[in-house]
Image (cartoon, grey):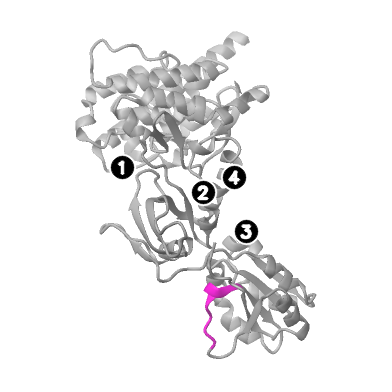
Amino acid sequence: MSAISRSVVYWIGSPPTIEERLEFERRNLVIRTLTEGTVIDFNVARAVVYNASPPYVPVVSAQIGSLLTALEHGLMVYLLAADDAIQAHLLREVPDAVRKGHLAMLVRSRTGSVPSFECAENIARHDAGRHANINLQIQLPPDVHLDADQEFIVCRAFSDCMAVSLEPLSGGLSATAFFAQATLTASEVGPRPLPFFVKLDEAHKIFTEVTNYQLFATHHIPWYLRPNLDPSRCIQGVERGILVGSFVEQSESLWQAVLNGKGPRYIHALFEDTLMGWRSQAYSRPPMKCSMASSLKDVFKWKRVPVQTVEQAKQHGSVRSPQELWEQLLNLPEQQLRYAPMHGDMHAENVRVRNNDAIIIDLANASNGPLCADVASLEVWLTFQVPNSNKQIPDRKVWTQVAKELFSPTEVNRPPRLASTDVGLDWLRGCIRQTRMIAGAICECDTEYPTAIALHLLRRSQYTTENEEDAYRRGYAYFLGSQLVEWLTTKSSASGSASA
């Protein structure tokens, strides 16, 4: 927590009454009224009170622009107004993103007479969190830069440090993730704590991920199989947020382990050990009858599929448009599905491995959904992700033939067959064998897993890329997804005709 008490309350506008001052003093809070020339230091403050009563309305109006800065520093904001018209005038300075978002409880608006103890009591109970250490030395590689908002929130998260070194980590598409090594300013143990992971993203996304860690991880994933957040360093501002937790030391990504031929045992550990607390929930209630596409509605966003990806897919055969494929998926009959917590973005860079453990990270998209969804997501990612090293990229014709075999409608429910010759993709076949055995044990019908696979193949086609091999694989994912959707549509029509 911050080494500064943050006991100051800035008071702007109509001065506090004697009774109000006494209420603040009783709670060890110091009121500082704003006068001409007053220098505001939000680092020492816990709240700011804007008191707009005549004749101080112009004074408050001139200073109300500091409201967003106060919120960025973690302060509570009180908007006191003599009547509704003045209050409406003040509230125009509060963006909708604040009033409707995670910071809404920090802005209190009161009109008319307010009990003398109210502001003091609520502000005394408020924890403003860490102050911004403007002297913090942020050390970055030469080719990495933070904008002013990112630097500010790092200065808050590491307020008790004299320096923090940030090294970028690979992984997500929108967030910025780092390996962080900090130097504490004062510690009885020593200046060098264990390393952290740091994630910078939009504030609402960080808020969601912190909430997901509390809901999905705390009581359902063993503490040693997930990162542990440092709550005091996890901060959400108006637009930017930061997530800070323990870094999984002496580990490598599942992707690296897979490429080294160690994938199957870690995939087994991931689903049977790490996520068993999630997956066991599926059997605490009967299967649900619902649509796979509706259950995974955020997986495939058909409007995002680039035209060039569809054109790339057409080189392999006839395909329908993204909208037509989505409507076909929505039109499939309901299935019996088992529901459980799911990661929502399961890929091999979101799993770290160490010794015999698979450690899950990045819970930003955790929710409840079909039990097979994470298995399908990982399987598709492993097949279509392009290795970083050119030496590990197989011949395109060979890869295409293997992918075609793995995801053909007649084979997608089965473990892959042994290759007749070594084509350099035995590591992939071993991983898919493991995912297929897991899927076969949990799916309730023979169309469940193909539908989940189809959705994740089409999801793969949503993103643009400048890498030629990656673009080819995304186009082929669209083609294979389209083939699966056509097969599912035909199968459901035949089943409907037979029932009639």
Quick check: 463 left or right of 368? left
Residue 130 image offset from top left, x and y in percent: 53, 64
Quick check: 487 left or right of 218? left
Between disc 4 and disc 3, the foreground one is: 4
First in sequence: mark 4 vs mark 3: 3
First in sequence: mark 2 vs mark 3: 3
- Residue type highlighted by circle 1: Thr
- Residue occupying image coordinates x 63% and y 61%: 104
Please state the extent of the stretch shown in magenta in the rendering: 38-46
- Cβ atoms under marks 1 and 3 closer than 8 Å: no
Tell me: residue 269, above or below residue 415: below
Residue matched to label 2? 229
In this view, the residue in front, 52 or 206, is 206
Binning the other alpha carbons within 10 Å of mark 4 as few (below 14), some (14 to 19) or many (20 upward) gives few
Tell me: residue 174, above or below residue 96: above
- Residue type highlighted by circle 3: Lys
- Residue occupying image coordinates x 23% and y 30%: 392
Residue matched to label 1? 465
Query: Which dot marks residue 214?
Result: 4
Residue matched to label 3? 100
- Residue type highlighted by circle 4: Gln
Residue 431 appears in the figure: yes
Residue 483 image offset from top left, x and y in percent: 40, 22
Is residue 44 rendered magenta in the image? yes
Residue 209 image offset from top left, x and y in percent: 53, 47
Q: Give the CA distance from mark 1 to mark 3.
A: 35 Å
First in sequence: mark 1 vs mark 2: 2
